[in-house]
Amino acid sequence: MVSDPIARCGRRLRAVGLAVLALFLTLTAAGAERRVALVLGNSQYQHALPLTNPVRDAEAMAERLQNLGFEVVSGYDLSKQQTQATVAQFAREVRGAYIALFFYAGHGLQVSGKNYLLPVDAALEDETSLDFEAVPVDFILRQMSRETSIRLVFLDACRDNPLAEVLARTAGVKGATSGLAEIPIENGGAGTLVAFAASPNQLAFDGSGGHSPFTAALIQHIGESNTSITEAMNRVTSDVFKATAGKQRPWINVSLTTEVVLHKVDLNAPLIVGEASAPQAEGGSDTRNTGAAPGQADDQLALNLLRQKIPKLATDEPILFDHPVKFGDPAIDGKSIAQLIKGTPLFSPVEGLDKSAWEGKHCDGCHEWNEARLCEQAKNFAANDVSVLRLQHPLGTRFKVALARWAQGGCK
């Protein structure tokens, strides 16, 4: 027998609806917009003291951007030649992208108002050596400006740089300083945002933790749901200023003609209930013998797309309630589930809720969480893995992933 065409159409519509939700959760502003990022981090300098955090900063940023739907070209501890090759690859891939993004962590300096990034093999002896040893920031900006609409630049490169001091002292180069100079924004496309870790001519801290203050704040805020990039950078600036007791203030130069939201979530989208919702074959249809309904393959494909967006934890070890967890999120790494539910949320648990209603409040006070109640919620995440993507969590999506792993292990 031939299956009912109306029922078949209904199954197809359900599959299309599931696929549309999957597109929302790919974190792109529109299905057609393409995002390409260049991420560079240099720590192991050969002619200056190594830096602790830049490579870790860059690796964490690359992962964050991939989760936000970016194609990422990355390089860590690169020589001048390797840097040029990596920028050339980025220049080829970024052409025609809707959003072009550049993130750099490492040594930087300015000479006569121009900014330079330093590869790990840079040896500066005089002003001429800049052309052969350093990489002009303007050179990279030109590559990301070809046939792109939006340019986003993040420079965590204002650390105390002894090479700038050597250049100024031994070569007599005027204006050689460790801080970066302000970058003028050119017109074109929908505009540009340039974010420095510190104000012009100001030094930034490398950080004593796993990331610099600027990168830690950037990773936390850049992908917050339904938040414009300008608002995200306001939050980054506030966090860095507080973390450094007012000694470091990020500097943002914005010329955008449109709102840029890197993580759009449809708050009215229905909750996905997993494979159990996949349409089954209608009784009496010719699919009865195979066990596969028309459209079921499409539903499974949509579910697989969603699963690819579930972030992974930084550990494969069992998750225990009162043991520290390597989440892979600097905001909560090293804390246990028991500690986190006694802590405060990272942002409003309800869209539009006034800060006075949640800032500084304890999570378990609102949710009445205890180990048993939390286990029941965690079992839902374990039974339906893609449900962790349904709504942003005040402690981050990786917290929900950890809860699912905890439930799978018996909520021990």
Image (spheres, grey):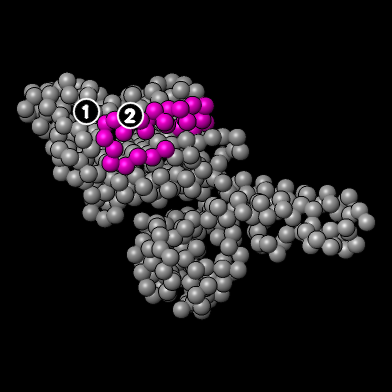
For disc 1, the neighbor class at 10 Å (few under 14, some 14 to 19, many from 20) is many
Residue 199 drawn at (x, y percent):
26, 36
- In the image, residue 5 sits, relative to residue 410, either above or below, namely above
| Residue 255 image-quadrant placement | top left
From the image, tell me which residue sits under label 2: 84
From the image, tell me which residue sits under label 1: 133
Q: Is residue 181 magenta?
A: no
Image position of 290 (left or right of 182)? right
- Residue that sits furthest to the right in the current view: 1
Q: Amino acid at mark 2?
A: Gln
> In percent of the image, x 21 and y 28: which residue is there?
133
Visible residue check, residue 339: no
- Residue that sits furthest to the front in the current view: 290
Quarter that holds the N terminus: bottom right
Task: Give the SS element for disc 2.
Answer: helix
Of the residues under marks 2 and 1, which one precedes in the sequence? 2
- Residue that sits furthest to the left in the current view: 170
Task: Give the SS element for disc 1.
Answer: helix
> In percent of the image, x 39 and y 56: which residue is there?
329
> In percent of the image, x 80 and y 61: which residue is there?
290
Span colored in magenta: 73-100
- In the image, residue 304 sits, relative to residue 410, either above or below, namely above
356 and 221: which one is in front? Answer: 221
Q: CA distance from mark 2 to mark 1?
A: 11 Å
Q: Amino acid at mark 1?
A: Glu
219 and 257: which one is in front? Answer: 219
Residue 347 drawn at (x, y percent):
44, 55
